[in-house]
Image (cartoon, rainbow, N blue to C red):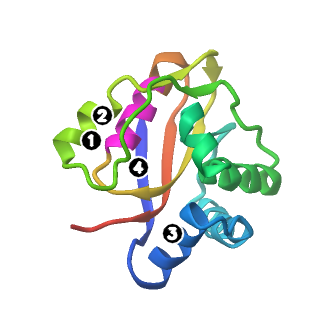
């Protein structure tokens, strides 16, 4: 089974914090933002064996210098003592999702992710913002191909409501 969660609304202070974290190099915000995820996991008794994150292409990583979802995953891993799956790759260069329509997003991310190892157990996948669900569906689709006997919990720090 796949479960999707958006923990906060992507508006106001939360939107500003995520934008600073994601686009302006405020990596220190990871500790605070990941604490929201950790509290959500505990409150909702979400049990998982591994942590995944939304990978970036090499070019995206080079532009930004860090992957914000990996930073969140790292903090959650430290707090929960669950390992991060490191065999997650974005194998396709894509356009930035921000100004794309839902259909354009679907085409943009189609088959963009691959996981290069079989996994047994429940997986927690961390993302920063859930907008149309395209990233969530594509990354969970990639995990379904390698998952043996487990559930997938996709948790986005924040969610838009358009």
Q: Which residue is mark 4?
A: 4
Q: Report the magenta residues as a range.
A: 134-142
Task: Indicate which disc, 3 or 1, sits on the residue closer to the N terminus.
Answer: 3
Q: Estimate the spatial distance between the alpha carbons at disc 2 and disc 1, rounded to whole Å.
A: 5 Å
Label 2 SS: helix
Q: In the rendering, at what x and y percent does residue 19 appear?
A: 51, 69
Q: Which mark is residue 105?
A: 1
In the picture, the quarter occupied by the C terminus is bottom left
Identity of the residue drawn at 63% across and 46% down = 47
Q: Estimate the spatial distance between the alpha carbons at disc 4 and disc 2, rounded to whole Å.
A: 21 Å
Q: Which residue is mark 3?
A: 19
Q: Residue furthest bottom?
A: 12
Q: Are marks 2 and 1 in contact (CB under 8 Å)?
A: yes
Quarter of the image for residue 88 reads: top right
Q: In the rendering, at what x and y percent does residue 77 appear?
A: 76, 49
Count neighbours of disc 3 (C-alpha within 10 A) and say few if under 14, some if 14 to 19, many if 20 or more: some
Which SS type dominates the magenta stretch? helix
Task: Indicate which disc, 4 or 1, sits on the residue closer to the N terminus.
Answer: 4
């Amino acid at each position: 089974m796949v479960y999707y969660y958006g923990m906060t609304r992507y508006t106001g202070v939360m939107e500003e914090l995520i934008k600073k974290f994601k686009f302006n190099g405020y990596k220190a915000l990871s500790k605070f933002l990941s604490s929201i995820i950790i509290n959500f996991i505990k409150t909702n008794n979400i049990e998982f064996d591994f942590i995944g994150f939304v990978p970036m292409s090499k070019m995206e990583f080079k532009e930004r210098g860090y992957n914000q979802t990996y930073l969140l995953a790292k903090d959650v891993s430290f707090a929960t003592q669950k390992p991060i799956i490191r065999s997650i790759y974005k194998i396709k260069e894509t356009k930035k999702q921000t100004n794309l329509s839902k259909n354009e997003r679907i085409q943009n991310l189609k088959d963009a992710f691959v996981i290069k190892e079989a996994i047994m157990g429940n997986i927690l996948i961390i993302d920063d913002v859930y907008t149309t669900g395209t990233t969530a569906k594509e990354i969970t689709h990639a995990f379904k191909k390698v998952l043996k006997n487990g559930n997938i919990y996709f948790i986005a720090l924040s969610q838009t409501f358009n």
